[in-house]
Amino acid sequence: MSLRLEHATDTGAEITSGRTREGTRGHPPCTCPRLGNGLRADSWEDGSVRASRNPQPAGRADARALDRSILTLAVPAFGALVAEPLFLLTDTALVGHLGDTALAGLGVAATILHTIVGIMVFLAYTTTPVVARLLGSGNRPGAIRAGIEGMWLAAFCGLVLLIVGLPLSAPLVGVFTSDPGAIDAANTYLSLSLWGLPAMLLVIAAMGLLRGLQNTKVPLVVAIAGFAVNGGLNAVFIYGFGWGIAGSALGTVIAQWGMAIVYIVIAVRAGRELGVSLRPGIGDPRTVFSANAFMVLRTLTLRASLVVLVWAAGQQGVAELASLQILLSVNSLIAFTLDALAIAGQAMVGHALGAGDTKRVTAISRRLKQWGFWFGVILAVVFAALAWVLGYVFTSDTAVLSLLPVGFLILAAGTPIAGFVYVLDGILIGAGDVRYLALAGIPPLLVLVVGVTVVLQLGMQGAAGLGVLWASFAVGTMGARALVLGARERGTKWLVPGAAR
């Protein structure tokens, strides 16, 4: 397929009151008139019309239309989203066979990097709803300009973080562990990986632009290519050249910059086609910084949970810390899998609000919640069944392997809740309800702090200590988020239609 930044028009037709509002690719919208004598015109996906005396119930037709829209966005989004955790899983699997010290070092460095990148995820999460609303209101050039501004902001933030991060890498690593071998491995991985930060932030911002344009297929192609390059380079650098954990970091950095360059080319071509300015800029500074500040606060509370979790495991021992790294890597894959539905929610909710269609937003929200929960149930069954064998993919260390089955079972127990939570998060992000999302992160963090305090005060270690620690996160924080976000979604304050919130 051509890597062009274009609006995906095959997201399914909205069916309302016996007519469709969107056409399919290559066909005009179908007005689906009533034909008289009890006959009704129903839309085929190819734009043709048929007559039916016994039409499908409107509710079922609406649900199927929404399902098509969700899947058209979510399936490609899944492939793009899992690129990041697959990078980490690849690193974990390859580095894990170097020993528990290297794996523990990777866990510390990855936590720091993911905290930084996680905080900067606002580059996508504020760009997507803005672009989607502008597109829904009919302003496509404005939508593309908003995305380009997001990429300029990403480039600036990435450069600043690189300059600041290099001298701070060693002190940051020392906060998480006192083991000399783990410290050395973490410093090596982190100092090299920081050079890929500007590229990773550019990728995040560019994906926000494409998601807002209802296009998740291009990010899928880029992600597949990036993952293939990353895996191949890491294997060669780690084992072929004997560079160890340094080779893992270098391979990932090269893959990240390759992806960033592709996105830059796509954005520049799209801007030139519509005569959109490519000059540096971020739009209205007050609006941008207000929205981004709330999203940063939201992300800080979420990332603080992971930092507290890793710190607590580091106090227990190297085996617990290494086990937690594997659990977090698998959890990242699950999270990004479920987040594919959330990305569909962001794009669809933002577009519908831009068009002023709050009824469609409500229908999207209801359907996505069903998808999120039941998909979480399916994932839970899979990981529960693999609990006793999955660890061998990542390590051969017996101490680590003895701790993993309990962790995987706890992870499975929390996955249905996570499916519900991630979808709610995507819906509210798509609506631009960033202030509430920022405050909603505090109760879950408090739940985790209580669990960590219990573990450390009782001196719990081994499977019991790691189990309680992990349950506080995988079940406790997810349960708290489900309650807080669910309460908001049931109201109407987040439903604000228009080209801007």
Image (spheres, rainbow, N blue to C red):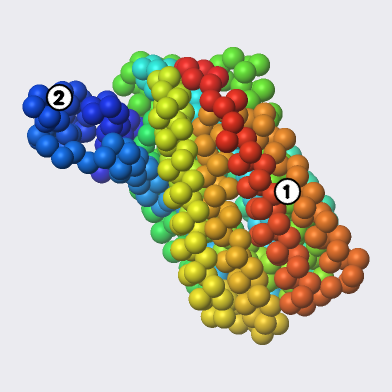
Residue at the bottom extreme of this rendering: 398
Q: Is residue 440 rendered to the left or right of residue 154?
A: right
The image shows residue 238 at horizontal and vertical percentages of 55, 69
Label 1 CA crowd tier, 10 Å (few <14, some 14–19, many 20+) = many
Separation (CA) of disc 1 from disc 2? 52 Å
Q: Secondary structure at mark 1?
A: helix
Q: Secondary structure at mark 2?
A: strand
Residue 50 in view (yes/no): yes
What residue is shown at x 52% (from left), y 65% (from top)? Answer: 380
Q: Is residue 52 above or below residue 269?
A: below
- Compare residues 83 and 131 and report the one nearer the observer: 131
- Compare residues 242 and 264 and report the one nearer the observer: 264
The image shows residue 27 at horizontal and vertical percentages of 16, 29
Front position among marks 1 and 2: 2
Q: Is residue 440 rendered to the left or right of residue 8?
A: right
The image shows residue 230 at horizontal and vertical percentages of 47, 58
What residue is shown at x 30% (from left), y 28% (from top)? Answer: 16
What residue is shown at x 63% (from left), y 47% (from top)? Answer: 482
The three-letter code of the residue at mark 2 reads Arg
What residue is shown at x 60% (from left), y 82% (from top)? Answer: 396
Q: Is residue 26 above or below residue 77?
A: above
The residue carrying mark 1 is 444
The three-letter code of the residue at mark 1 reads Pro
Numbered badge on residue 34: 2
Q: Are marks 1 and 2 in contact (CB under 8 Å)?
A: no
Quarter of the picture containing the N terminus is top left
Residue 202 in view (yes/no): no
